[in-house]
Image (cartoon, grey):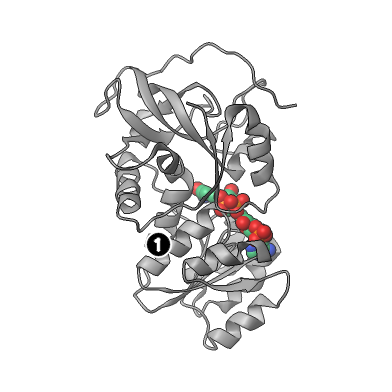
Amino acid sequence: MQEVFDRPDPAPGRGEVLVRVLVAGVNPLDHVLRSGPVPGLDGGRPFPRVLGMEAAGVVLALGEGVDGIEVGDAVFGFALTGGGTYAETTVLSAAHTARIPEGLSAVVAATLPVAGTTAVDALDQLDLPAGAAVLVNGVGGGVGLSVARLAAGRGLRVIGTGSAAKREQAEALGVRFLDYTAEDVVAATRALVPDGVDGVVDLVGGSSLRAVAPLARDPRTVISVGDASVSDLGGRFVERRIDRANLERSAQLALDGVLEPVITAVHPLADAPIALAAVESGHASGKVVIEVG
Ligand SMILES: NC(=O)c1ccc[n+]([C@@H]2O[C@H](COP(=O)([O-])OP(=O)(O)OC[C@H]3O[C@@H](n4cnc5c(N)ncnc54)[C@H](OP(=O)(O)O)[C@@H]3O)[C@@H](O)[C@H]2O)c1
């Protein structure tokens, strides 16, 4: 059961900031955590619990040992200790929180901690030169469209897979779009790049990852963001950097228009279950957010 309920403001612990949430990002990890413990993440907390890993908001109070953030700052970052961001107030980890620069909206900032920095990290890890061909498997979702935008900005040739509803948004970013529900995307990619692609960023995993991984000329250039078994194929799981410096960098890229999250749905807090269901379907378009403040 999912419902809106009252709770006291969480107290910021050491290294945490209490934030009045303006916007919370919705991510696949939220429903995964709802379903039970995730190794290394705070999934085993008792219910009722508040979902949500990322938010943009205004700092209300500082815990002990917080540097570089003041009460009243507009910030965005990660809730790592289970406070949950689908809420009016939450606690963010100060080391994983940054100021929102002037000119960047809270809606965009709220999408950067998870999807934005993941897109940056995956492409940094690939480190492909301009002109190289990259396949983005699952291009229509929150991470996929950000990867596509960033990759285009780096001068890469982007091929992306998704279902028909994702075609328009992907093509608007210059992606050569392949509809996996209507065509053999492996054969279609081979037709486009007969020698294989220079890199794969996989957002789908499972049998879909296994089908597209051999399209890479070098298996080490297959980066999966969601499926750690990519290492069985000779590829690599994305190396995440979720510190303040990487958040600041992502915000600057967003200000520069190079990292441009495609926000397709903004829901009020009361509709959080609808927002989560859209992502839980596994077929979300771009980023879904919850506007609280
Ligand atoms: N490691 C990390 O730190 C990290 C960070 C962020 C995300 N992730 C993980 O990365 C994955 C993607 O995240 P996200 O936020 O982008 O998810 P999302 O917004 O739900 O998008 C996933 C996309 O994949 C598409 N898709 C599903 N099956 C497909 C298939 N067989 N072929 C091609 N596309 C397919 C979906 O729509 P259509 O099928 O309609 O095209 C959807 O647009 C999730 O597993 C998430 O948990 C990990």
Residue labelled with disc 1: 150
Report crowding for label 1: few under 14, some 14 to 19, many 20 or more residues within 10 A (C-alpha).
Answer: many
Above or below, 112 against 63 in this view is below
Residue 225 image point, x, y percent? 53, 55
Residue nearer the viewer, 178 or 81 = 178
Q: Judge from the rendering whether residue 161 lies leftward or rightward of residue 151; answer left or right.
A: right
Residue nearer the viewer, 173 or 245 = 173
Residue 140 image point, x, y percent? 58, 60
Residue located at (52% from left, 24% from top): 83
Q: Judge from the rendering whether residue 126 lies leftward or rightward of residue 50; answer left or right.
A: left
Residue located at (29% from left, 24% from top): 66
Residue located at (59% from left, 72% from top): 213
Residue located at (51% from left, 21% from top): 88
Residue furthest toward the right? Answer: 1
Question: Which quarter of the rendered picture does the N terminus lie within?
Answer: top right
Q: Is residue 237 visible?
A: no
Residue nearer the viewer, 287 or 221 = 287
Above or below, 142 against 126 in this view is above
